[in-house]
Image (cartoon, grey):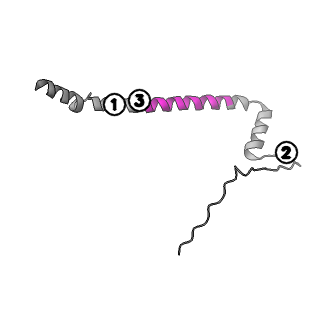
């Protein structure tokens, strides 16, 4: 009887219960995954920043990302069919 009471106490009622430990372990795992994600993003951003220290790379980035151009220069944007978002059909209410 005492053994059963002890097991029930440890599994469900104690501050350090098995269920509480499972919940905490899941939170720890989520936080570790977030940490790893942000470390990868930080590494990628630092690589991009190093590349942008070069003036040629800044110009290339501005041209590709923001469609900037030099004076007296024309820029043509070519979009492929896969990249174009087709508008959704308008729904009419009857």
Q: Which residue is mark 1?
A: 22
Inter-mark Cα distance, 1 to 3: 10 Å
Sort mark 1 into few (<14), some (14-19) or many (20+) by Cα contacts within 10 Å: few
Apparent side of residue 3 relative to residue 47 in the rendered image (left or right): left
Q: Nearer the viewer, residue 28 or 83?
A: 83
Q: Identify which residue is drawn at 82% across, 46% down.
A: 69
Apparent side of residue 27 relative to residue 94 in the rendered image (left or right): left
Q: Identify which residue is drawn at 15% across, 27% down.
A: 4
Sort mark 3 into few (<14), some (14-19) or many (20+) by Cα contacts within 10 Å: few
Q: Nearer the viewer, residue 88 or 40?
A: 88
Q: Which residue is mark 2?
A: 70
Judged from the image, the secondary structure of the residue bearing numbered disc 3 is helix
Quarter where residue 40 is shown:
top right
Q: How many marks?
A: 3
Residue 86 position within the rendered picture, expressed as x and y whole percent measured from the top left = 66, 57
**Segment colored magenta:** 29-47
Q: Identify which residue is drawn at 44% across, 33% down.
A: 30
The disc, 1 or 3, on the residue closer to the chain's N-terminal end is: 1
Residue mark closest to the camera, 1 vs 3 = 1
Magenta span: chief secondary structure: helix
Residue 36 position within the rendered picture, expressed as x and y whole percent measured from the top left = 52, 29
Sort mark 2 into few (<14), some (14-19) or many (20+) by Cα contacts within 10 Å: few
Tell which residue pokes out farthest to the bottom in this image.
94
Residue mark closest to the camera, 2 vs 3 = 3
Position of 87 relative to 94 (above/below): above
Q: Which residue is mark 3?
A: 28
Residue 83 is tagged as none
Residue mark closest to the camera, 1 vs 2 = 1
Apparent side of residue 82 relative to residue 43 in the rendered image (left or right): right
Inter-mark Cα distance, 1 to 2: 59 Å
Judged from the image, the secondary structure of the residue bearing numbered disc 2 is loop
């Amino acid at each position: 009887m005492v053994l059963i009471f002890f097991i029930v106490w440890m599994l469900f009622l104690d501050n350090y219960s098995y269920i509480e430990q499972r919940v905490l372990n899941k939170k720890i795992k989520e936080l570790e995954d977030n940490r790893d994600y942000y470390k990868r993003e930080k590494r990628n951003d630092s690589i991009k920043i190093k590349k942008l220290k070069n003036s040629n790379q800044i110009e290339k980035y501005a041209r590709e990302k923001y469609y900037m151009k030099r004076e007296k220069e024309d820029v043509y944007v070519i979009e492929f069919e896969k990249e174009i978002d087709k508008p959704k059909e308008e729904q009419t209410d009857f």
